[in-house]
Amino acid sequence: MKKILALALSVLTVSSVLASCSGERAAEKYSPKITVSSSDAAESAAWLTEKLGDRLTDEVYLAVGDAKGIDMSDFENDGYVIRTDAGNALIVGRSADGLDRGVRKYAKAVQSGTADGLDITYHEGYRVKRLTVCGRDISEYTIVKVADVTEYEPLAAQESMDAAADELQSYIEKTCGARLAIVTDHDAVPAHALRLAIGSVADYGDEAFSIKVTDSGDVVITGGRYRGCMYGVYDFLEEDIGWRFVNDIYGRHSGNNNYQIDYLYESEHVDVTSAADRFEDSSIKYREFYDAADTVYNTPLAKKFKVSFNVPGAYGLTGKACHGIDAAHSQIFLNDEYGGLRTEGGQPCYTDEAIISAIESYALRHAAECIASGQRIGREIVTIDIAQPDSENFCICDECRAVFNKEGCNTGAVLMMTNRVAEAVAEDYPGLYVSMLAYNGTEAPPKTVRPLDNVRISYCFYIANRVNLYCNAHHIDDEDCEENRRFTRLFDKWTEMSPNVDVWYYPFQWYNVAFQDPVFDSLYYDMKYLASQNIGGIMCLTSNSTVSLLASLKSYLASRLAWDASITEAEYYAYALEWFRIVYGEDSGENAYTYFRMCETANDILDECCCFFHYGEDMPGTHHMVDAKYMADNFDFMYELYHDALDEAESAGQEKRLKSYFSGMMYVCIGITYEDRYTNGSSDERAVMAERYRECYDMFVECNRMVTFEAMEGASPSYFNAEFDLERNPFEYFVPDPFGE
């Protein structure tokens, strides 16, 4: 603390309590025992009054910012001070969030009978009090960049290295306050260095890195030419210093844009030793992750997740296909000059010479425009996306049907068109790929046509004509799951005929978003399987709704597996537990994690195929993902788990996160037990169910949660009705088919 007056508590006299006139006090919703320094403390005062009621016996003074001689300038935003003595309590927060956390800490102390004599200072100064390398203070070090990168692609290497140096400087300063100078190796060589270097292309490629502490005590981070140094720096910050970079979808869909959490473990002393000696490279080359709240996709967090594609300043792009025809140049097929679409609302004719010529012209023009703007093949531009529209309605003209009969599938005509365009692109732009989808009617490879060397295939583990359903409940390569074997057999054929196969992977629920999709066991094994197949890249769709539960956790875990598929299942779930603790609070996170694992258990017990993103009537509710008996038997335990978590919440933000997360549990468990415990239950059971149902309803309203995904066709989302209706099972709020089909 810079300065705390010795008599801070003594100024909490009767006169200070009476500083607010009686008229003002009458309008406030908090106890007359509480005095607030300003209106931004009133919410905490109201919460404290409601929480403690008659147990509030101290005269309490609440303040945001400097107050009563306490200087808050060295505190983090969530920092606070609590001082209690002789019936007086002083709680000061750096911000409203800090005060909220301090008030909650004080309330717990009152409830436990330990409030008298509190002297708590939370998050003052830096979280790491001392940072050293082999015992030498970090302030003695200089960040040194290699200046001569002419052996490599100079601009790419330099941009990445500059970014890495800036991030290293910034985060070390955030760690302990030391701001290190950044120089190049052409400058005077410092005595001790954190050295960034570029390794040989043969060993390090684009993004591999090594970290080594030398005998002289230097830290050397050597990386691949595009992203290696940058990834090495983030890894050094995580593994050797204690930073964690976490995403949180709740922050984005609640409207506060706090999707990124930079978390540092507190320590009196962190020493980086010679044990820091490792080399790492990615298990999957192209790695891209998408949740509709954009916590990873197109954000700075992608670099920290080692997912550096389609991100400005991330020094690389993905090679995936994504409905390029539909999204980029649908005018080609709508133009009367070419006869328009051959199918209503569906695919173009892939054998029409005019249409093929138009696509070819587009691809060449697009490539020329990208290169003219300074983009480089293999860096900013990897592929030209000419993938099919999102429709299973393929052309049935005579020419297309002839190709279908010869090749045994719609894919034949699509691949023939793609090869034609790829041939033209290869002639003018060697090294540039053309990409297509194997998706929704084109999963099967053709009998005779083979992709050219510069064609990339994006194979989708998805839905085949909305009939054959990919199963999320079982592993991709589960021999006993016929649904998945149907997909993997086709996938194997594609990988046999082409080395340029990427994957679209969908570990999410599209439509049933009121409940956590229990896909995490499958996610672990699926990612390991895909990494073992030597695929070029992966696009992992962890959510297609901004309210999908745990989409952020899926991105967090899947990105770790895509980088290092060798992590064990125990390590995987340790990362999950850590994520819960950071996002939901140390103690509350433990409870949330326990419930999280119970959902996985409930799915394992069910042991039935489930397509979590399917919107057909054969899977009309979220409860079909889990064993109903298990959920019913454990409802009371889960309910207590939730309320214990609420009691342990360290802030209002954590509390709302918990309500949003556990709302799905309440919805599903009430729906499963509604008939037994309410319709046919005893008076006591009905009373308990009524209380929980009301609570569930309020949770959905407060957190703006929805039961179903808002349909892309413009249908309204299925929120709970405006009027609470106890006589309806909550499953009746579920609309089976948002597409009206």
Image: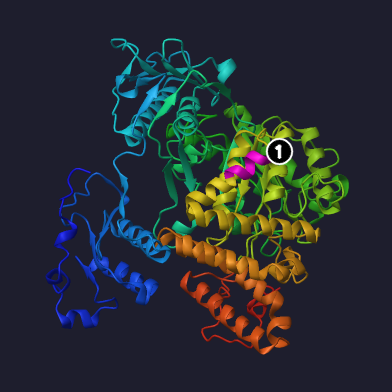
Q: Is residue 236 magenta?
A: no
Viewer-proximal residue, 359 or 259? 259
- Looking at the image, which is closer to me, 67 or 188? 67
Q: Position of residue 207 (x, y in %)?
A: 54, 26
Quarter containing the C terminus: bottom right
Quadrant for residue 157, please give it.
Answer: top left
Judged by its main secondary structure, the magenta piece is: helix
In which quadrant will I find the N terminus? top left
Name above or below for residue 201 compared with residue 721. Answer: above
- Could you tell me which residue is drawn at 39 percent across and 63 percent down? 113
Does the magenta-highlighted stretch encompass residue 570?
A: yes
The residue at the point 36 percent across, 16 percent down is 193
Q: 314 left or right of 543?
A: left
Q: Is residue 112 visible?
A: yes
The residue that appears at 67% across and 46% down in the rendered structure is 504
Classify 694 as above or below 481: below
Residue 393 seen: no
Q: Residues within 10 Å of mark 1 (few under 14, many from 20)?
A: many
Q: Residue at x 39, y 19 (%)?
A: 135
Q: Is residue 617 left or right of residue 270?
A: right
Q: Position of residue 261 (x, y in %)?
A: 43, 47
Residue farthest along the front direction in this orientation = 86
Is residue 42 found left or right of 389 in the rendered image? left
Q: Which residue is mark 1?
A: 528
Say what amino acid the circle numbered 1 marks: Lys
Q: How is the image coloured?
A: rainbow
Location of residue 653 in the rendering, given as x and y in whole percent from the top left corner: 42, 61
Q: Return the residue nearer the eye: 174 or 535.
A: 174
The stretch of residues the image draws in magenta is 569-575
Residue 320 higher or lower than 170, as above or below: below
- In the picture, measured across the screen, residue 535 lies left or right of residue 717, that is right
Closest to the observer: 137 or 524? Answer: 137
